[in-house]
Image (cartoon, rainbow, N blue to C red):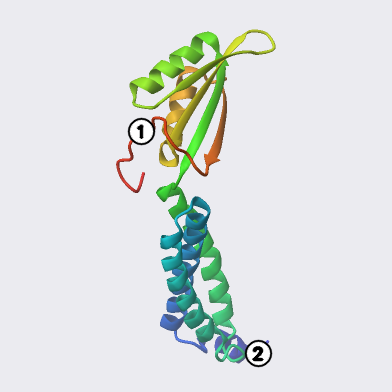
Amino acid sequence: MDWDAVVGFFTAVTWWELLIIFVAKIVEVSLGTVRMILVNKGYRNESVLLSLVEIFMWVFIASAVINNLSEAPIKGIVYGLGFASGVYLGSIIEKKLAFGMVLIETIASETTGMAIAERLREIGFGVTTISGQGRLEKRVVIKVFSRRRNEEIVTKEILALDPTAMIISEDIKRMTGGFVTRSKSLFK
């Protein structure tokens, strides 16, 4: 084995240059993830600004990696690791930001369904109930429109009162009217 080639593979570029490539790629991909979510949620102006920053970063990072790639292939590996890490970090950021609205529908027995509806109203959520008939008994369909960042709170409250309740959650693209709890902050 040619140890000089192995050592050269890892030392052809300074560690700080590799670190800059890695961190910059994480930031760029995380911005891209957030940008795509903003586009899907209808935040056009914000996504345009992020796309501008994202493409400038991509151009400079990619050119730094492609330049002399044959002499320092470790740059390509670090670039790939930065990309994967950026996707992961972007998904964490998106979960913290929790943009948008959800419709949380719950199907529960008549007794627990009304208790769930009352509890959700007590803690400030707008609730609509609809009577229904299941296979064996009367049911209540509970509808709650909520900001995504409150989805976990609603789900925990429902499951605390009825661990067997059927819960369905859907993203809402557009909503007008009705009652939705106010948001307190951008992050959870």
Instruction: Note whether 122 is above or below 55 in the view shown.
Output: above
Left or right position of 137 against 179: right
**Could you tell me residue 21's position as x and y percent?**
47, 77
Cβ–Cβ under 8 Å for marks 1 and 2: no
Which residue type does callout 2 highlight?
Asp
Left or right position of 132 against 128: right
Seen from the viewer's position, the closer of residues 169 and 8 is 169
| Residue at 55% from the left image edge and 64% from the top image edge | 84
The mark closer to the camera, 1 or 2, is 1
| Residue at 48% from the left image edge and 53% from the top image edge | 42
Q: Residues within 10 Å of mark 2 (few under 14, many from 20)?
A: few
Disc 1 element: loop
**Could you tell me residue 58's position as x and y percent?**
50, 76
Q: Which residue is mark 1?
A: 181
Q: What is the spatial separation of the Cα atoms under label 1 and label 2, in whole angstroms?
A: 66 Å
**Could you tell me residue 174's position as x and y percent?**
50, 42
| Residue at 55% from the left image edge and 90% from the top image edge | 67
Instruction: Note whether 91 is above or below 150 in the view shown.
Output: below
Picture quarter with the C terminus: top left
Label annotation for residue 35? none
Which residue type does callout 1 highlight?
Thr
Q: Which residue sits furthest front?
A: 177
Of callouts 1 and 2, which one flags the residue occurring earlier in the amino acid sequence?
2
Picture quarter with the N terminus: bottom right
Q: Residues within 10 Å of mark 1 (few under 14, many from 20)?
A: few
Seen from the viewer's position, the closer of residues 6 and 165 is 165
**Could you tell me residue 180's position as x and y percent?**
39, 33
Q: Which residue is mark 2?
A: 2
Disc 2 element: loop
Instruction: Note whether 153 is above or below 18 in the view shown.
Output: above
